Amino acid sequence: MQTTEMNLLQQGVWLSEQSAKQQGREDGFEHGRREGYRIGFSEAALNALPQDNRSVRDLHILYVTAGIGVPYPALDQAIIDAFKDIVRRLTVANPSEDVVALARKVKPDLILVLNGVVVEEDTVKKLRQNGFKTAVWFTDDPYYTDWTVSIAPRYEYIFTLESSCLPFYRKLGCQQVHHLPFAVNPKVFHPKHVPSSYQSDICFIGTAYWNRVEMIDRLAPILKNKKVLISGWWWDRLQSYSLLADKIRLGDWMTPEETASYYNGAKIVINLHRSSEDDTINANGRKIPAFSVNPRTFEISGCTTLQLSDVRSDLGQVYSTETEIGTYSSHEELIDKIEYYLRHEKERQKVAFNSLIRTRKDHTYHKRLRTMLNIIFP
């Protein structure tokens, strides 16, 4: 190669490198500007919300944890954190402990059990015989109703995150049955800066139930060309797995803190509820439908991230659709909205901000537990 050609080639490489560096600086500046605005506006909006100055309830709660593995420890911690702020005294027990002896010793005003699957029937019977108020908060309705059908009648107060289960429990003879959705733990799911390793265009975190597998397979042609994170169990069920494998964290259950980091780093988080008829670890032989939203609905919204959710009939009771949460009814509509919101940053951020404000006003565990206590101790 002649000297002149060599110089021209070197000059071209140099110009290409400078152009790439300049583009990188511009992209970095733009991302920093966008993130600074997102975090700054979120903090200002949250600071402007009325503070919860209501006094602590003069109550002693004995809280019995779910006593099983993920995701229940995170739910336990969210409830414990909230109770510490709203009641005079909190005692926490594991189902493996002698809960009856503990209750006799500390004499709580209420014993609340999460899930109730591993608490022995005789334990609850003895608690009630000793005059203690008992309540259970079911975490997985309607998917575990083949189990809860025998658990619910043991307790004085039944709380369920699924509104469709209210008549089910009442037909069992339960007198105090109440719909109480889960919520957000703002200590974990809140707006924050995250490293580039957590950033994506589109994020989905959850188990690969079959309706989710079908949806992601339908989205694969657009997902393959975008920065995407999919995480959870059984995603190798996908027909498009080989196409999306580099975007999937297979069989990985994230901590709540890591989940919150990925939500914060995503432009769009997809929420697709599990089908009530899915046969994967499903104990819903009565085929009770599912109307209520899952806990992720509140957790995603708590991170100032645009959420695109499938429609459940109770969704409009907790968020205003399209202004506080995006919705879709088909994979075609979801594709259209993904493409639209990735092109329209201001609209995306506006919905995310609205969702954050609504979540902090109405959907924290502090709010939920105050509601519960007001029902039991009016």
Image (spheres, grey):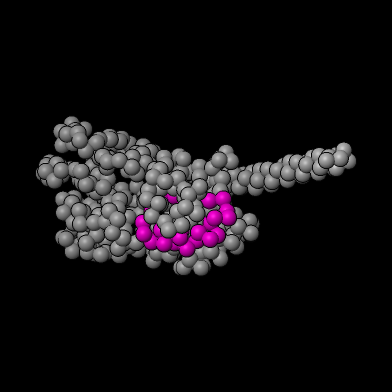
Residue 281 is situated, as x and y percent measured from the top left of the image, at 27, 53
Please say if 94 is above or below 235.
above
Residue 125 is situated, as x and y percent measured from the top left of the image, at 12, 45
Query: Which image quadrant is residue 288 in?
Result: bottom left
Residue closest to the far right: 4
Q: Which residues are magenta?
A: 204-229
Please say if 289 is above or below 39.
below
Q: Seen in the image, is 347 located left or right of residue 235?
A: right
32 falls in the magenta region? no
226 falls in the magenta region? yes
Q: Is residue 367 visible?
A: no
Please say if 157 is above or below 55.
below
The residue shown at (64%, 59%) is 343
Position of the N terminus, as image quadrant, is: top right
Q: Nearer the viewer, residue 319 or 139?
A: 139
Residue closest to the far top: 105
Q: Nearer the viewer, residue 320 or 342?
A: 342
The residue shown at (25%, 54%) is 144
Q: Nearer the viewer, residue 99 or 75?
A: 75
The residue shown at (50%, 59%) is 220
Residue 342 is situated, as x and y percent measured from the top left of the image, at 60, 57
Q: Seen in the image, is 140 located left or right of residue 132?
A: right
The residue shown at (27%, 56%) is 282
Q: Nearer the viewer, residue 281 or 363?
A: 281
Q: Is residue 200 visible?
A: yes
